[in-house]
């Protein structure tokens, strides 16, 4: 009896040890994954802030509008990327919030000055003074980030410390991690600029959200019908989504072809708002053109018709394509739908149609008040025109739209989109076209 008792006790102890070790291994693995993610995001923040400081230094002394435009475009792009990675790091500190706001304002100001220089206009003395002020604050931010990077690398600080102890003391001084930034930015608050694209404007009335109210069962049936070719194993209702831009029903799907699919479908009209698919993507085998066609067919099936691809980016073998609605060959840029397509097998991994559902409507009175020849007279004479057409563009920070001639052209090897008001002949917008390894973007 005693022997059996000891055997059973030994087995139980071994099982407890085994489960304990398994749990510890899982936690350790998860902790390592999180730490690697934080390390990567932080290193990207440091790199981009260092770049921004260098570009601001160049912008302070550059007299050439062409060089200024290029440098300011880099400041704009790197500021936005720094913000993305900043938000992936577990800092909970007022200084962090001010750092992100500062980078937003650097981005906005650089964007505004780049628009100014694209037409060959020189920067004013006030512009140079503002750039100098931004440079000084950026230097302070860079110094703190580099010091923190050193402390992380030598083990003085850990991500666990930063994540769990918001009052953690930085180095040996009686200050928190970002308190030096907070004090530096106290004087900065609102100093420079809070203009272009600082506020995201949506339509108060969702013009594209047409149709009658549907119930959850109808929405579920619509989802099942659309994704039937994925061989659905299970569909789960996640209830109603309220308080966002559009009231919706949310669903999760398990299928034989894709591990998880998450879908939001609008209560009004039963429009697909968001689709997110969880799938590993292998090596690329499709061209961008084939991916664009897959995305268009997907939108046609959903009911988003007459969509034309505009620009795209590629990240980790996934291409994200912007499609805009066309009416009589006129591009409606406010009516935007984004689609993600895997370049290994052409599977659509996501879509987002908030822009379209906010803005889509058939526009009336789209007859130009001036001819295209008259519009060309208002272009920079150095612009080598590549293509031209008509488009409707959103007016910055308003719910208004502008009917324009769209000219794609090139100056000094750099491509631009110039928008001339189709009624008045005034210049409405100039965008720089950036062709990178990741795709084609505009700023």
Image (spheres, rainbow, N blue to C red):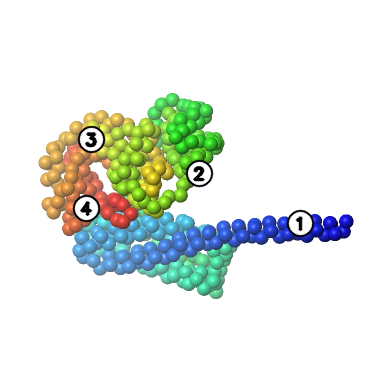
Q: Few, some or many C-alpha atoms within 10 Å of disc 3 (few <14, some 14-19, many ≥20)?
A: few
Asked if residue 170 lies left or right of residue 23, the reply is left
Q: Kindly state the secondary structure of the residue where label 4 is placed.
A: strand
In this view, the mark in front (2 or 4): 2
What residue is at 29 percent from the left and 45 percent from the top? 289
| Quadrant where the N terminus is found in the figure | bottom right
Q: Quick one: label 2 or label 4, which is nearer the N terminus?
A: 2
Q: Quick one: label 1 or label 3, which is nearer the N terminus?
A: 1
What residue is at 57 percent from the left and 64 percent from the top? 161
**Residue 329 numbered tag:** 3
Figure check: 22 above or below 254: below
* Residue indicated by mark 1: 12
Q: Kindly state the secondary structure of the residue where label 1 is placed.
A: helix
Do labels 4 and 3 touch, CB within 8 Å? no
> Is any atom of residue 4 visible in this view?
yes
**Residue 244 position in % (x across, y down):** 47, 39
Pick whichever, 279 or 267, lies toward us.
279
Q: Kindly state the secondary structure of the residue where label 3 is placed.
A: loop
In this view, the mark in front (2 or 3): 2
> Is any atom of residue 186 visible in this view?
no
* Residue indicated by mark 2: 259
Estimate the spatial distance between the alpha carbons at disc 2 and disc 1, rounded to whole Å. Answer: 36 Å
Estimate the spatial distance between the alpha carbons at disc 1 and disc 3, rounded to whole Å. Answer: 74 Å
* Residue indicated by mark 4: 415
Do labels 4 and 1 touch, CB within 8 Å? no
Q: Quick one: label 2 or label 3, which is nearer the N terminus?
A: 2
Estimate the spatial distance between the alpha carbons at disc 4 and disc 3, rounded to whole Å. Answer: 22 Å
Asked if residue 57 lies left or right of residue 175, the reply is left
What residue is at 29 percent from the left and 42 percent from the top? 309
Q: Where on the picture, by quarter, is residue 169?
A: bottom right
């Amino acid at each position: 009896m005693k022997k059996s008792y000891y055997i059973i006790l030994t087995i139980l102890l071994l099982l407890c040890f085994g489960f304990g070790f398994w749990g510890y291994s899982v936690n350790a693995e998860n902790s390592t994954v999180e730490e690697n993610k934080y390390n990567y995001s932080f290193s990207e923040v440091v790199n981009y802030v260092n770049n921004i400081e260098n570009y601001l230094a160049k912008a302070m002394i550059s007299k050439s509008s062409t060089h200024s435009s290029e440098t300011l475009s880099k400041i704009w792009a790197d500021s936005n990327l720094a913000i993305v990675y900043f938000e992936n790091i577990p800092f909970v500190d007022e200084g962090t919030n001010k750092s992100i706001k500062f980078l937003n304002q650097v981005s906005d100001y650089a964007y505004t000055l780049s628009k100014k220089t694209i037409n060959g206009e020189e920067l004013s003395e006030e512009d140079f003074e503002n750039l100098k002020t931004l440079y000084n604050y950026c230097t302070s931010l860079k110094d703190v980030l580099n010091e923190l990077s050193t402390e992380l690398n030598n083990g003085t600080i850990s991500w666990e410390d930063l994540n769990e102890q918001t009052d953690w003391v930085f180095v040996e001084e009686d200050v928190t991690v970002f308190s030096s930034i907070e004090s530096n930015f106290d004087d900065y608050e609102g100093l420079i600029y809070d203009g272009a694209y600082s506020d995201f404007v949506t339509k108060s009335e969702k013009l594209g959200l047409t149709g009658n109210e549907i119930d959850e069962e109808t929405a579920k049936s619509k989802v099942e019908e659309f994704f039937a070719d994925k061989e659905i194993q299970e569909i789960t209702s996640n209830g109603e989504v309220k308080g966002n831009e559009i009231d919706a029903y949310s669903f999760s799907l398990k299928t034989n072809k894709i591990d998880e699919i998450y879908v939001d479908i609008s209560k009004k009209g039963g429009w697909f708002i968001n689709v997110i698919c969880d799938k590993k993507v292998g090596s690329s085998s499709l061209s961008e053109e084939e991916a664009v066609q897959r995305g268009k067919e997907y939108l046609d099936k959903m009911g988003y018709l007459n969509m034309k691809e505009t620009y795209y980016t590629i990240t980790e073998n996934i291409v994200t394509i912007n499609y805009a609605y066309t009416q009589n060959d006129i591009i409606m840029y406010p009516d935007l739908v984004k689609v993600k397509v895997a370049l290994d097998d052409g599977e659509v991994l996501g879509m987002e149609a908030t822009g379209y559902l906010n803005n889509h409507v058939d526009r009336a009175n789209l007859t130009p008040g001036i001819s295209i020849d008259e519009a060309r007279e208002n272009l920079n004479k150095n612009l080598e025109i590549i293509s031209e057409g008509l488009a409707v563009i959103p007016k910055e920070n308003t719910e208004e739209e502008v009917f324009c001639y769209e000219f794609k052209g090139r100056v000094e090897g750099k491509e631009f989109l110039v928008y001339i008001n189709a009624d008045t002949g005034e210049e409405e917008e100039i965008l720089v076209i950036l062709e990178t390894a990741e795709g084609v973007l505009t700023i």
